[in-house]
Structure formats: structure tokens, C-alpha cells
Image (cartoon, rainbow, N blue to C red):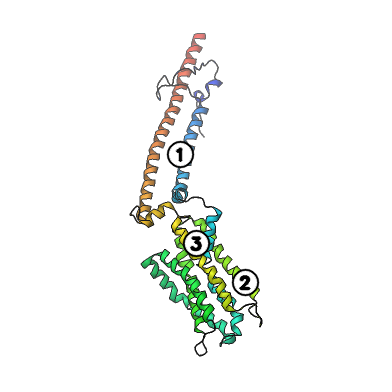
């Protein structure tokens, strides 16, 4: 427990002590220092301590989200809609459409009821083939070139399937097998290429919009399938019309991606400068420079805080010196009265 002498108490609590508020404050510890009560001294020091701890807490959070706060602009609903449309062409929509027509194929292809198993095997073979392929292409040509290829592949798959779904070699529907393989392979690019690319170069809040577009495309296919009734003998329309409908729909993600790239919607400005070579520096170099700038800011701020802390300590010491002076004046007054 800290025991304070009586002269640490507020001058107002001591009778006979006169405080001249007009007297200018001198240097710390000098006789001319303005009297400062313990309450004021403690309040000043606590404020200085609060500013210091608050700054470090804010700086640790600010450095973590510096790029996001400074380089990402707020997006409108129309701009987010472009990423919704893009999500319809870089995910599992085409693969889902193919399996939605299983009941139609079972009664019209040579495999019969075995077509579902055959397509499932073909789709699973995409994993060891396309995952290394996408990773290799990402290093060779970049993520955006891969996304362009995926956006082109989706409508191409629907066109080929619409025209050749009933073609077979012996007892194998090779067109359907190839469609299942390529559609599943292009769908895997979302987790391997598209989502990391979006989180790195664009506003991460756009990821839900992209995923929503993927689910929206699959739901539109399901609704179209319900209207078609592919399992009935007298279905409303066949697989050719079904896939041609989504060929037109599948071209929209390509135009959305071109629009996003040309306009820079949702792009982090610093990231965009790096990618376009405007600064001529790699992302790692820019990140290192950002950290160096942050260290300089923290160092400058620390020096400022030290100066402020010294000033606060001077105020506190000045207050203590003023209390000693008042105590001496009170003793002189008491002796004079005696």
C-alpha cells in the first residue's frame, strides 16, 4: 500500500494555503512551478498512459489491416453482381448440369442405367489430372489466364454435350465421359485458382458473391430440369435444348470477367499497381516495404510518446514541487500568526 504524505493532498483541503492560478508555470522541479494537486497529477499521468496503450493496440490492428483499409473501396450492388455472374462460370455449374440429365440419358444412351456410374468415374479422374495441371499453368501463365480458359471451357463443354450427347463408340458414350471429366476439372479451379486469386488481388468480401453465383447457376439448372422433366418419356424438351440454353448463359461469366479486369472493380489499388508493373516491384518486395514503413511509423510514434511522457512527468514533478512550496508558505503563515 502506498502511503502519501499530507503535502500530497489537494491544496484545497489545507486551510490557509493560497493558490495563485495566474502565476505562470515554470520548468519542472523549479520553485516557480504552478501548484498541481495529486488528483490532477494522477489524471494527467493516466491519460498519458491510456494514449500510449491505446496507440499500441490500435497500431497492431491497423498494421494487420493496413492494405485492406487503405486500398479497398466500397462496392455497389451492381459491381458485386459482376462477381455473382462470374461465379456462375468458374464453379461446378456445368458439372451439375450434366448430372441433372442422368435420368434423361439412362433411357437413351447405350450404357442405360450404368451411365451414372460411368460419369461419376470420369469426373473423379479429373482430380489427379487437373489439379497438377492448374498448379503448373498458374506458375507458367498466371492465375488470370487460367480463369480466362475456364470461362471459355464452360460454354464449350455445353456446346459439345448438346451436339454429341448421344454419340457412342461401341458401348461407350465418349462425349459424355469427356464432358464429365473436363467439367469436373474446370470446377476444381475455383478452390485452386479462383478463390486464392480473388482473396489476393481483390476485396475478400467478394468471395461470398462469387460463391453465391456458383450456387445460383446450379439452382437455375435445377429449376430448368424440373420444367423439362427429363425422366418422363414425353419430356418437355431434350438434352440438346437444355444444354444450348446454358450455353448462352455460360457466356455471361466470360464477359463479366473481362469487365472486371478492364475496369478494376473491387481491386486492391496497391495490388493492381504491382500486377500491372506500374511500380516495377513484386508483391513480396512491396509487402516488405510496407513493413519497413510501418516500423518507421512506430519508431517515430514511440519517440513522440517518450517526449509526451517526459512532459507529463515534468507536469507531475512540477506539481509536487508546487506542493512543497505551498507547505513552506503555510509554515511561515502559521509561525507569523503564532
Would you call the spot at circle 1 few (<14 residues within 10 Å), some (14-19), or many (20 or more)? Answer: some
3D distance between C-alphas at marks 1 and 3: 48 Å
Between discs 2 and 3, the one toward the N terminus: 2
Q: Is residue 184 above or below residue 55?
A: below
For discs 1 and 2, the disc positioned in front in the rendered view? 2
**Residue that extends furthest to the left in the rendered view of this protein:** 280
Between discs 1 and 2, the one toward the N terminus: 1
Q: Residue at x 46, y 56 (%)?
A: 202
Q: Which residue does the numbered mark 2 point to in the structure image?
A: 224
Q: Is residue 48 above or below residue 334?
A: below
Viewer can see residue 338: no
Q: Which residue does the numbered mark 1 point to in the structure image?
A: 52
Please tell me the numbered disc located at residue 256. 3
Between 332 and 111, the one nearer to me in the picture: 111
Would you call the spot at circle 2 few (<14 residues within 10 Å), some (14-19), or many (20 or more)? Answer: some
Please tell me the numbered disc located at residue 241. none
3D distance between C-alphas at marks 1 and 2: 62 Å
Answer yes or no: do the residues labelled 1 and 3 have beta carbons within 8 Å? Answer: no
Q: Residue at x 44, y 27 (%)?
A: 315
The x, y position of residue 280, in whole percent, is: 33, 54
3D distance between C-alphas at marks 2 and 3: 23 Å
The x, y position of residue 208, in whole percent, is: 54, 60
The x, y position of residue 226, in whole percent, is: 65, 73
Answer yes or no: do the residues labelled 1 and 2 have beta carbons within 8 Å? Answer: no
Would you call the spot at circle 3 few (<14 residues within 10 Å), some (14-19), or many (20 or more)? Answer: many
Q: How many marks?
A: 3
The x, y position of residue 195, in whole percent, is: 48, 63
Q: Is residue 273 above or below residue 225?
A: above
Q: Quadrant of residue 272?
A: bottom left
Amino acid at each position: 500500500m502506498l502511503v502519501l504524505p499530507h503535502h500530497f493532498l489537494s491544496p484545497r483541503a489545507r486551510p490557509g494555503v493560497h493558490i495563485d492560478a495566474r502565476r505562470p508555470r515554470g520548468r519542472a522541479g523549479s520553485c516557480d512551478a504552478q501548484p498541481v494537486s495529486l488528483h490532477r497529477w494522477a489524471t494527467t499521468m493516466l491519460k498519458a498512459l491510456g494514449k500510449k496503450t491505446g496507440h499500441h493496440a490500435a497500431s497492431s490492428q491497423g498494421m494487420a489491416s493496413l492494405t485492406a483499409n487503405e486500398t479497398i473501396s466500397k462496392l455497389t450492388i451492381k459491381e458485386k453482381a459482376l462477381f455473382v455472374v462470374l461465379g456462375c462460370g468458374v464453379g461446378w455449374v456445368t458439372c451439375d448440369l450434366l448430372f441433372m440429365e442422368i435420368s434423361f440419358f439412362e433411357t437413351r444412351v447405350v450404357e442405360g442405367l450404368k451411365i451414372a456410374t460411368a460419369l461419376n468415374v470420369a469426373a473423379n479422374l479429373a482430380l489427379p489430372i487437373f489439379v497438377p495441371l492448374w498448379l503448373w499453368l498458374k506458375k507458367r501463365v498466371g492465375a488470370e489466364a487460367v480463369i480466362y480458359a475456364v470461362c471459355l471451357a464452360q460454354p464449350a463443354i455445353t456446346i459439345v454435350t448438346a451436339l454429341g450427347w448421344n454419340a457412342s463408340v461401341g458401348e461407350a458414350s465418349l462425349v459424355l465421359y469427356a464432358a464429365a471429366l473436363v467439367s469436373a476439372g474446370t470446377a476444381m479451379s475455383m478452390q485452386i485458382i479462383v478463390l486464392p486469386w480473388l482473396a489476393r488481388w481483390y476485396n475478400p468480401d467478394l468471395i461470398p458473391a462469387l460463391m453465391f453465383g456458383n450456387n445460383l447457376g446450379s439452382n437455375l439448372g435445377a429449376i430448368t430440369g424440373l420444367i423439362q422433366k427429363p425422366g418422363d418419356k414425353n419430356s418437355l424438351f431434350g438434352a440438346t435444348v437444355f444444354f444450348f440454353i446454358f450455353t448462352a448463359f455460360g457466356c455471361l461469366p466470360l464477359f463479366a470477367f473481362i469487365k472486371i479486369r478492364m475496369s478494376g472493380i473491387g481491386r486492391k489499388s496497391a495490388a493492381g499497381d504491382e500486377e500491372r508493373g506500374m511500380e516495377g516491384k513484386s508483391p513480396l518486395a512491396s509487402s516488405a516495404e510496407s513493413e519497413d514503413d510501418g516500423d518507421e511509423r512506430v519508431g517515430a510514434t514511440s519517440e513522440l510518446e517518450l517526449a509526451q511522457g517526459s512532459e507529463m512527468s515534468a507536469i507531475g514533478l512540477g506539481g509536487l514541487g508546487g506542493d512543497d512550496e505551498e507547505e513552506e508558505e503555510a509554515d511561515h503563515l502559521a509561525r507569523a500568526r503564532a
